[in-house]
Image (cartoon, grey):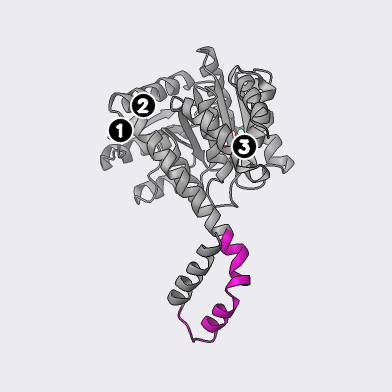
Amino acid sequence: MSKNNIDTLLYRALNGDIRAISKLLTIIEFPADHDIETISSIMRNLMNRGGKAHIIGVTGSPGVGKSTLISKLISLFRDRNERVAVLSIDPSSPFTLGSFMGNRIRMQSHSLDPNVFIRSTATRGVTGGLSPSSVLLIEAFDGLGFDKIIIESVGVGQTDVDIINVSHTVINVLMPGAGDEIQAMKAGIMEIGDIYVVNKSDKPEADLVYRQLTEIIRSSKYKSKYGWVPKVVKVSSIMGHGISELGDIIDEHRKFLIDRGSFSDIIIHRRVYSVELILKYIIEEKIRKDLKKDGSDILDKVVSGNIDPYTASLTIYNKLAKTC
Ligand SMILES: Nc1nc2c(ncn2[C@@H]2O[C@H](COP(=O)(O)OP(=O)(O)O)[C@@H](O)[C@H]2O)c(=O)[nH]1
Ligand SMILES: [Mg+2]
């Protein structure tokens, strides 16, 4: 893409032109389809302007009501005139009609609002974590001046780890009957969330989950690495109950981070983490593609027991690194 075309596209996108934003995001979503100068010039322009958006990760098992909740949060933020971007990370392909349409239909009421942008993207397989394009899209939304960037993720494996590393505020959504999650928290193997939302509080069993969560957080004296004590809130996304209370807690957490200087620390962390994430992806792709081709003689020797896996790995690494 010529420099002139990039400049025009950026100018239009930065002035809120929805079609230009769409076009820009599509370029960023498939970076390998473009020359590196195009991507780096677009991203440099956007990242120089970024660092202001509040990134909110929303995680939880399928069906707990994340999309419904996010739709309500979008309305809340829009009422304050904030611009909202949503990145929906689906572990399967974003292009399977079911998951894609499911998310879209629930968020449909915002689809005509030019200050709300919803993008659905894939992870690297079911538990493989955020894709390189996801982290680029987050930086792009930030640079384009969105005030809130909400990432919806199904709470599994590496994707959750990635969400924690790129978000300012992590909201963990549970629902009545969340016995397994409660047990995992008690055992200390689930420590994700600045805010716990007990959704579907229109159901009577929600009180039990709320009490159990509150008690676990109280008795464990748990604090996040920034010193925040997680909050629990009961919400009914369908009825709209508890949404404004949740909004207040989200604001309180943001203010807490800003007051301690942690808000910008998290941005620094996010950007460094993004490089590690993409670098890992590139190296893994390289191994996947070239190992069998460039390393077959060495692999044969490992199989026959003539070279150990450690020596073999270092030898192959040195060979691959030369062709990177
Ligand atoms: N009773 C009740 N149902 C809800 C509530 N929020 C969402 N749901 C329903 O739960 C189902 C899953 O919601 P969805 O937002 O798609 O969940 P996600 O998979 O976590 O994104 C849908 O049928 C929703 O209508 C709620 O507050 N109360
Ligand atoms: Mg959903």
Question: SS at mark 3?
Answer: helix
In the rendered image, residue 159, in percent from the top left (x then y), is placed at: 51, 47
Instruction: Name the outermost residue toward the front.
Output: 3
Q: Quadrant of the N terminus?
A: top right
Q: CA distance from mark 1 to mark 3?
A: 40 Å
Label whose residue precedes the other's in the sequence (2 or 1): 1
Q: Residues within 10 Å of mark 1 (few under 14, many from 20)?
A: some
Give, as a three-letter code, the residue at label 3.
Thr
Quarter of the image holding residue 65? top right
Which residue does the image show at 30% across and 40% down from the upper left?
225
Give, as a three-letter code, the residue at label 2.
His
Picture layout, residue 316 above or below residue 58? below
Q: Which sits in the foreground, 273 or 295? A: 295
- Name the residue carrying label 2: 253
Give, as a three-letter code, the residue at label 1.
Trp
Nearest to the eye among marks 1 and 3: give it.
3
Q: Which mark is on residue 38?
A: 3
Q: Residues within 10 Å of mark 3 (few under 14, many from 20)?
A: some
- Pointers 2 and 1 in contact (C-beta within 8 Å): yes
Question: Is residue 102 toward the left or the right of residue 275 in the image?
Answer: right
Q: CA distance from mark 2 to mark 1?
A: 8 Å
Looking at the rendering, the stretch of residues picked out in magenta corresponds to: 286-308
- Count of residue discs: 3
Instruction: Tell me the quadrant of ligand 2.
Output: top right
Q: Which mark is on residue 81?
A: none
